[in-house]
């Protein structure tokens, strides 16, 4: 009897190992397809040329549109009962908190750069609000291919492929914490020509936001905001006339971020448990609070 139980356990472990390899290979294939689609077009034009950007839009939108099929096939193979759209972070429950809270948390982290930007801006607050509410401003933005790439297409497609499609496949075999920090590795492998991405703290943070909130919209908005802000110009802050106030804001932003990270990513705001959390058998503070 004990021998039979041992054989069954061994077979289950082999099946689990096979599932993990399938998940990892699927994620790697997704990453390669995404980046490969950027280079199917041969051109001597620079990457910021509108014609190049439009062609790449076509490629990544096709790959991103097909990427949920990987999750669907994995879901059918593993007999997962969670709805496909919910696993991808497309659902209504907790939608408003998923828009507001992750973006607020990211803005807190960028408190120093935001303070520096406001000090150096020639516009007053009311001027800025007036510009944002002006339809002509958004018309200009939407006609700018680089703006569309950095603020809309890249955040949406990258978060869909590298977050929404990969996390559901990785969580059952890797666990929540390992899966969160594994997704940026696939992003880094796919963007080996931008290895610095591996070092960006935002990648692991966005995976955590997706896992806790179970929504795609939060990471997309945070990604877009990070692209707009760029990497913090600490060297410029050190030379700024108001450097004491700015550096204090940098420090305060980091401290507040870590203080608010777990309260603002509590799954209780977004519906407990979130769909991705239902895929793991091991309890996690990321799923319940």
Image (spheres, rainbow, N blue to C red):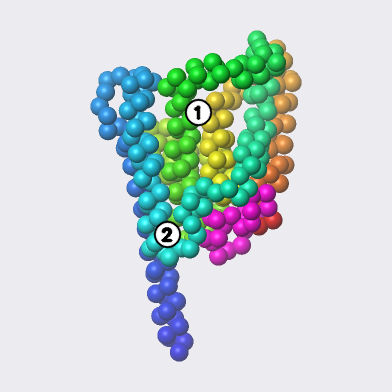
Most frequent secondary structure within the magenta stretch = loop
Does the segment drawn in magenta span residue 95?
A: no
How crowded pointer 1 is (Cα within 10 Å; few <14, some 14-19, many 20+) is rated as many
Residue at the extreme front: 135
User: Residue at label 1?
Assistant: 151
Q: Which residues are magenta?
A: 268-287
Numbered disc 1: secondary structure: helix
- Frontmost residue, 228 versus 273: 273
> Alpha carbon of mark 2 to alpha carbon of mark 1: how far?
31 Å
Q: Whole-percent x and y of residue 71?
A: 41, 53
**Image quarter hosting the C terminus:** bottom right
Q: Whole-percent x and y of residue 42?
A: 25, 27
Task: Say whether residue 92 is left or right of residue 124.
Answer: left
User: Residue at label 2?
Assistant: 75
- Frontmost residue, 110 versus 148: 148
Task: Say whether residue 136 is left or right of residue 238.
Answer: left
């Amino acid at each position: 009897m004990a021998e039979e139980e041992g054989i069954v356990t061994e077979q289950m472990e082999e099946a689990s190992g096979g599932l993990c390899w399938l998940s990892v290979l699927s994620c790697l294939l997704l990453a390669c397809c995404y980046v490969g689609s950027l280079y199917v077009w041969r051109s001597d034009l620079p990457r910021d040329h509108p014609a190049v950007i439009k062609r790449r839009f076509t490629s990544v939108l096709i790959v991103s549109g097909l990427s949920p099929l990987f999750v669907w096939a994995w879901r059918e193979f593993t007999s997962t009962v969670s709805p496909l759209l919910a696993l991808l972070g497309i659902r209504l429950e907790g939608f408003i908190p998923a828009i507001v809270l992750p973006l607020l948390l990211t803005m807190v982290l960028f408190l120093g750069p935001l303070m520096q930007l406001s000090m150096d801006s020639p516009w007053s607050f009311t001027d800025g609000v007036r510009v944002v509410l002006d339809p002509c401003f958004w018309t200009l933005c939407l006609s700018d291919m680089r703006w569309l790439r950095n603020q809309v297409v890249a955040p949406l497609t990258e978060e869909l492929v590298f977050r929404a499609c990969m996390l559901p496949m990785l969580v059952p075999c890797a666990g929540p914490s390992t899966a969160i920090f594994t997704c940026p590795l696939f992003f880094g492998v796919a963007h080996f020509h931008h290895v610095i991405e591996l070092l960006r703290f935002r990648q692991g943070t966005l995976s955590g936001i997706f896992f806790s909130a179970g929504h795609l919209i939060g990471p997309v908005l945070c990604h877009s905001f990070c692209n707009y802000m760029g990497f913090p110009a600490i060297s410029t802050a050190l030379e700024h006339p108001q450097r004491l106030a700015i550096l204090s804001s940098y420090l305060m932003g980091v401290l507040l971020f870590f203080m608010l990270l777990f309260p603002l990513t509590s799954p209780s705001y977004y519906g407990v448990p979130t769909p991705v959390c239902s895929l793991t058998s091991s309890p996690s503070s990321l799923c319940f609070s």
